[in-house]
Amino acid sequence: MTPHATHPGRAVAEVVAAATLFGTTGTAAHFAPASAAPGSIGAARVVIGGAGLLAVLPWLDGNRRRAIGLWRSPWGLTAGVMTAVYQLAFFAGVARAGVALGALVAIGSGPVLVGILSWIVLKERPRRAWWISTALCVAGLVLLTLDGASQPSVDLAGVALAFLASCGYAVYTVAAKHMMNSGTPAVEAMASAFSLGAILLLPVLLFTKPTWLAEPSGLAVALWLGLVTTTLAYVLFGRGLRVLDAGPAATLVLAEPVVATLLGVLLLGETIGVMGWVGAGLVVIGLGLLGTTAVRHGPDAAIIEEMLP
């Protein structure tokens, strides 16, 4: 691990920066050609992003051969397969259950699943600080979702797919963290997972007839989603995850829906009511408390706990 990545404050900033880039995904996809199916956009994102991560490895002191070699390990294979699973399941779930409910299930349950799974697999016992911060963030996300929800009925299959996406994300995150704990450089763990995910999703991209990529707007959207919201974002996420416990890192990623909401208001003309602003505020407070914990005491202690009886 490089020296600059050992400071928890920098790790928090890197994960939040990654979440900010994640939050631009929906706005960018809005500008894709009408012929671009959601599944095709998701597959293109991973294919381009995975290739980008492999391409930049030498400039980040990584090794392509070692990254690809991780596919032969149980944890490397798991991370790659789950990368493809959560991407496909998320887009399918949102398409069936609606953006509001699908995103709430997929994104909101992610930190809880990561926290529990990392407790079981990585022995990273969640602290009270994490539970409080995560509860605040999830409550805020619920308010954000309810503020814009207009789905008249619930598609149970869509909800199940969204939850499958959350499970895939949780398993991927814990698998990547396990590899890092075993000495794998963060950038190699990220490149390994997404390059394998890219191979698995390439047939999906071809099957969905990606003619939209030939249009200037389509190519621009695909490059942004692949190189910025995947390659760059996951380099940052991996560097932060290398230092932070998996649970807190996953909670910090809940900055994503706040960024997405703000971009929707500022760039797409969407509106947000009082409930939505309160929800966004709760997420920001939760992230602030969790970030303060990491900066003041590092990943092995919690300042919030000192403030509690």
Image: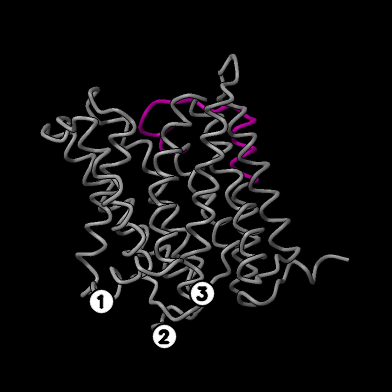
Q: At which x and y percent is residue 278?
A: 64, 37
* Quarter occupied by residue 35: top left
Q: Which residue is mark 1?
A: 63
Residue visible at 73% across and 66% down in the picture: 127
Picture quarter with the N terminus: bottom left
Q: At which x and y percent is residue 241?
A: 49, 68
Residue nearest the viewer, comparing 50 with 61: 50
Label 3: how many Cα within 10 Å (few below 14, some 14–19, many 20+) = many
Q: Amino acid at mark 3?
A: Val
Above or below, comparing residue 90 to residue 224 in the picture = above
* Quarter occupied by residue 133: bottom right
Q: Based on the picture, tell me whether residue 256 belongs to the magenta stretch.
A: no
Q: At which x and y percent is residue 295?
A: 59, 73
Q: Which residue is mark 3?
A: 243
Label 1: how many Cα within 10 Å (few below 14, some 14–19, many 20+) = some
Circles 2 and 1 in contact, beta carbons < 8 Å? no
The range drawn in magenta is: 262-282
| Dominant secondary structure (helix, strand or loop) of the stretch shown in magenta | helix
Residue visible at 35% across and 33% down in the picture: 267
Q: Which residue is mark 2?
A: 3
User: Is 302 on the left or on the right of 121, as rendered?
Assistant: right
Mark in the foreground, 3 or 1: 1
Q: Amino acid at mark 1?
A: Asn
